[in-house]
Image (cartoon, rainbow, N blue to C red):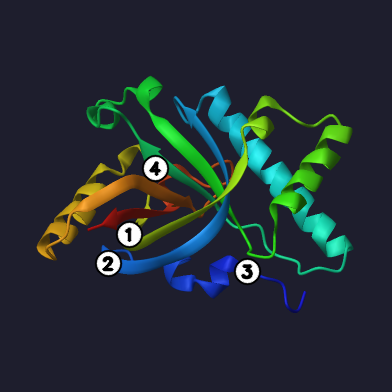
């Protein structure tokens, strides 16, 4: 459809980056967000994914039906952190903390999200994860990023390369680790999964 907003195409350098560490400037985006903790294979993580996508698609179709700008629902993103960073190196997944996110175009308002939630509620499709959802702005600014291809549990080398690149440029990694999941793991072999790895620098 002509005029459809596609964040991936508007910000191609952020969603189709180079397969080597490089610096980017990440602008402010508006996100649907849900916080949680534990393994990405756990129920809380999977429920949060379902809540984000059901809300985003319901919003998209409501706006389109109302004659407002249509948009492509963007890829799933996640911020990751732990109180003890060794929880990632040692695979202590119950200590992992995360924020799952979907970018929403600027014309999507909190009222639009509330209306979509109301529609889902009428259809008895609201879950506990939906009730944890919020809409929030995030501006990362300067960051190092890397297009990683391979299984999710083998990212260590890529992350180390990002850290070495930052240090070689007089920078240090800051903030939370940021993944952008370009592939659907249900339909993609682990060795072919494409993930943008991103980390703020200072």
Q: Which residue is mark 3?
A: 6
Query: Which residue position is annotated with label 4?
Result: 151
Which is more N-terminal, label 2 or label 4? 2
Work out how far the residue at label 3 is from the one at label 4, CA to CA, in angstroms.
27 Å
Q: Dot 3 lies on which element?
A: loop
Find residue 4 and report its image quarter.
bottom right
Earlier residue among tags 3 and 1: 3
Q: Could you tell me how far apart the alpha carbons at marks 1 and 4 are, in whole angstroms?
A: 15 Å
Q: Nearer the viewer, mark 1 or mark 4?
A: 1
> Can residue 158 be seen by looking at this rendering?
no
Residue drawn 82% across the image and 39% down it = 118
Number of the front mark, 3 or 1? 3
CB atoms of marks 2 and 1 within 8 Å = yes
Q: Sequence order check: which comes first, mark 2 or mark 3?
A: 3
What secondary structure is marked by label 4?
loop
Point out the image quarter for the C terminus.
bottom left
């Amino acid at each position: 459809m002509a005029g459809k907003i596609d964040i991936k195409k508007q910000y191609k350098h952020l969603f189709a980056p180079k397969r080597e560490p490089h610096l980017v400037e990440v602008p402010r985006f508006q996100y649907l967000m849900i916080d949680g903790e534990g393994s990405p294979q756990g129920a809380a993580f999977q429920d949060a994914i379902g809540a984000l996508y059901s809300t985003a698609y319901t919003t998209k179709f409501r706006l389109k039906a109302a004659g407002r700008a249509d948009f492509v629902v963007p890829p799933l993103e996640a911020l990751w952190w732990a109180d003890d960073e060794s929880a990632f190196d040692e695979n202590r997944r119950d200590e992992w903390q995360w924020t799952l996110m979907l970018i929403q175009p600027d014309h999507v308002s909190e009222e639009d999200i509330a209306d979509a939630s109301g529609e889902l509620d009428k259809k008895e499709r609201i879950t506990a994860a939906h009730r944890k959802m919020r809409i929030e702005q995030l501006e990362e600014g300067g960051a190092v990023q890397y297009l990683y291809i391979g299984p999710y549990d083998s990212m260590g080398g890529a992350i180390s390369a990002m850290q070495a690149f930052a240090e070689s440029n007089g920078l240090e990694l800051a903030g939370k680790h940021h993944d952008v999941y370009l592939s659907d793991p249900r339909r993609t072999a682990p060795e072919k999964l494409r993930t943008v790895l991103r980390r703020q620098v200072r």
